[in-house]
Image (cartoon, grey):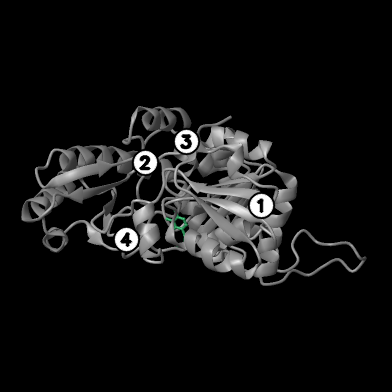
Amino acid sequence: MSGFTTTAIHSIEDVEKNAIVPPIYLASTFTQPTDGTEGEFEYQRGGNPTRTQVEKTLANIEGAEHSFVYATGMAATQAAMGLVQAGENILLGMPNYGGNYRFATIELPKRGASAKFIGDFSTLSDDDFDEKTTMVFLETPANPTLKVSDIAKISEIAHRNGAIVVVDNTFLTPYLQRPLELGADITVQSATKYLAGHGDLLGGVASTNNPELAEQLWKAQLISGGVLSPIDSYRLLQDIKTLALRMDRQQENARRIIEVVQNHPSVEKVLFAGSYNESDAEIQARQAKGIGALFSFTLKEGKNIKAFLDSLKVFGFAVSLGGIESLICLPATMTQGAYTPEHLEEFAVEKGLIRVAVGIEDIADLEKDITTALDAA
Ligand SMILES: *Cc1c(COP(=O)(O)O)cnc(C)c1O
């Protein structure tokens, strides 16, 4: 077994021409044998050599049997959550990415299915499941509170109750966390974030080791049509090659910025993966190789968020994360803007919560920028 980055770089070879990067196949359709057999590829929505290349690489870096790429992370969520059928229900970990919440609360009911919220998986028990519960869908660390959930323990309870487990692994990627190895059945990721990493590509991935689930995830491409284009498949393939390098730098920068923010007198509290209590820290250390590069914090009462934001010059004020550039957002009105006021409160997405996605810029510049802004608050 090669290491992560060697695998990311060398999963695909152009055997025909010995080019160090593969060609891009743009063909919408592929001519077929006339003897009734099927060619390897038929029509681009169902499969394309360039998409296969990035899917193979993604599967290899995740240690998964099957990976499928979609036009956006939400198309990957749709493929996974869309497995739920009329009359069934899911347990949705909360808080969760706003788009996942939207799919669960708007789209599932249209299909005759429903979602029950789980705000704290540490007390999950058989009583949370009924005979119609077929899926647990969670994000760990959670967006934007960074609260951690124990994937292995949740998978054990879910499987005992006949439900599959889907983990949105966007925040940590397979470089830092591999939910399938911990017992999850499907992982989804927004490739828009760390996998692509340069703020210029939308994409999604779903992976599994289960052949029947794989068939369904492929059918979601074929039937719903939200597939990644050949050009974006190629670009994603190139981007993944530097994922580990970028994440190492982002994580190192994040650790330092967390320290700076924690020690600033304007700051009330700082949240990051494993920050809640000893059990949280233990779970994070056991199931992931680091804390990632996201954290959230609140300012002390009387401090001015607008003055803080207006003072920032290097950190951009925008949704999204995982790119080389540092971004800051206010989840309650931005990424979690679809939540009802009651759900914002119930799941601790405070109005004043500030989420930080740390990029790869020079640490001295990031430190100076955020310190100046905190001083201005
Ligand atoms: C952005 C995001 C998504 C959705 O991905 P898109 O590519 O924007 O559709 C899903 N989950 C998480 C955690 C995200 O951050």
- Point out the image quarter for the N terminus: top right
Q: Residue beneath label 1, please?
A: 16
Relative to 148, 219 lies left or right: right
> Measured from the top left, where is residue 130 in percent x and y?
66, 47
Type of residue at label 3?
Ser
> Measured from the top left, where is residue 4 in percent x and y?
50, 36
What's the residue at 69%, 52% (across, down)?
132
Tag 4 secondary structure: loop
Q: CA distance from mark 3 to mark 4?
A: 24 Å
> For the view shown, which residue lies furthest in the left direction?
375
Q: Residue beneath label 4, please?
A: 332
Indicate which disc, 3 or 2, sits on the residue closer to the N terminus: 3
Q: Residues within 10 Å of mark 4 (few under 14, many from 20)?
A: many
What's the residue at 13%, 58% (across, down)?
308
Tag 1 secondary structure: loop
Q: Residue beneath label 3, please?
A: 122
